[in-house]
Amino acid sequence: MKSFKGYLLEAKDEQGHGSDSEGEKLKHIHHAEDRPLMHGSEGFEHAHGALTQAHEHMKAGQKNSNLTMKYDGSPSVVFGHHPKTGKFFVASKSAFNKNPKLNYTQKDIEANHGHAPGLVQKLGAALQHLPKVTPKKGVYQGDLMHSHDDVKTDKKTGKATFTPNTITYTASGDEAKKRAKSKIGVVVHQKYEQGRDNELHNMHATPNPDTHNFGEHSDVHLQSAEHDTSKINYAKKDQDEFHKHMNAAKEIHDTHGSQMYGAIHPSHAGEGGHLGTYINSTVRTGDTPSAKGFQQHLTGHFEKAAGKLKSEAGQAKKREEGASHVAHVENNKAHYENLLKMHSHLGAAKDTLVRNLNQHSGGLEHHIDNTKTDPEGFVINHTRNGKTEPTKLVNRKEFSKANLLKVKAWKK
């Protein structure tokens, strides 16, 4: 059967579960260390709080929806009973669009997504089988891990494998038998709470999907994303390493933050700013982020933009614009260096957490291109100023690089 990988654009990934509006509709989740690059002081406070919460959660050996494992499923599917009509539906992330594509029947799926046969097959399986376990009220979001024909069983070992996206998962023993017997596998990671007027687009996301309220059926392999940290040995040396980097990041924030954040050019920060695209480029290349490297990135960006223009005057203007950005970084070089150093320390603290969280892989083996690897990553749901937002904890040198370099031919 053809892989789903060629058929669905799920926003601008590498960046996780989709595009943005955290705390309302779950679409995109930020890396902890990137938050200060986008949102300055507020971003740092959230990142620091989220990482500290994950550290304390692991120290206590907890298992709840505050800290979950990321599963590399595809597509992400929204499903449940419409809050106004009570009818069961399935949808891609377009469920919350202004003009949503909600599927109540197979005919709806074919009408809405007929241009993408792989998506039609996946949503069709979801529509047929998820009602067998889904509570009669509520709207949920999860990652499809497999439909029936995606699971391959090794006759010698009894192991079952499936590859929903970048990672190949392998289950053993009874777990392999359950996977092979099921018609669909899904990891549920989000529930949507009631909104104004019982309208779907007014619902807001919560990180507690209450999977214990779901039923059981052999056709549906249902899995919670909660990560059991009681199975992790969080050594003191690793805790000390975590604190070392967190303290170094906070010292930069406390000492330089009052001037540092204000010195960053507005188009360099924020959602989709140049700093974010630069960081992703260093993930691809393995380079250490620096002010000089960022200047080179800006020069390349504006040179490429100039190359797309026909007139020499337009090209010259675009290059001048690039030169002004480079000059701004040069004039505020110490602030950019401090910001990127702080980013590095937050990333190192996060990597310490991830390295320990990886000790428990959720009972599955993970491979990328036949090479054994760790889970995709983890999500910590941190509440600040009364608002709960998910932050992802991912080994960018491994999974994010593989995902960024993967050639995709997505279709919406």
Image (cartoon, grey):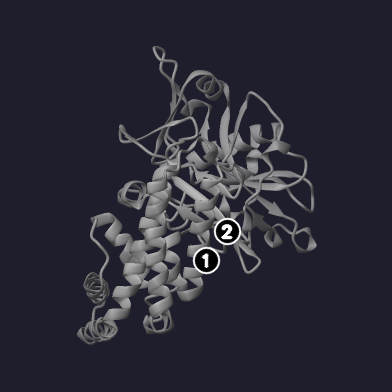
Count every numbered label the image shows and give the total.
2
- In the rendered image, the vertical position of residue 45 relative to residue 83, given as above or below: below
The residue under the point 53% across, 26% down is 148
Position in image of residue 376 (x %, y %): 42, 44
In the rendered view, would you say 409 is above or below 303?
A: above
Q: Give the image quarter of residue 154.
A: top left
Residue 184 in view of the camera: yes
- Residue 345: quadrant of the picture: bottom left
Q: Is residue 200 left or right of residue 328?
A: right
Q: Secondary structure at mark 1?
A: helix
The answer to which of marks 2 and 1 sits earlier in the sequence is: 1
Q: Residues within 10 Å of mark 2 (few under 14, many from 20)?
A: many
Q: Nearer the viewer, residue 356 or 363?
A: 356
Horizontal side, residue 124 vs residue 399: left or right: right
Pointer 2 residue: 382
Question: What residue sits 32% from the left and 68% below the top?
Answer: 341
Q: Residues within 10 Å of mark 1 (few under 14, many from 20)?
A: many
Residue type indicated by callout 1? His
Q: Amino acid at mark 2?
A: His
Q: Which quadrant is home to the N terminus?
A: top left
**Image quadrant in which you'd find residue 258:** bottom left
Q: Residue at x 63, y 60 (%)?
A: 99
Q: Calculate the distance from the C-alpha at mark 2 to the C-alpha at mark 1.
A: 8 Å
Is residue 29 among the parts visible in the rendering?
A: no
Decide: marks 2, 1 in contact (CB < 8 A)? yes
The residue sitting at 58% across, 45% down in the picture is: 77
Q: Which mark is residue 46?
A: 1
Horizontal and vertical percent position of residue 196: 77, 64
State the residue in front, 193 or 147. Answer: 193
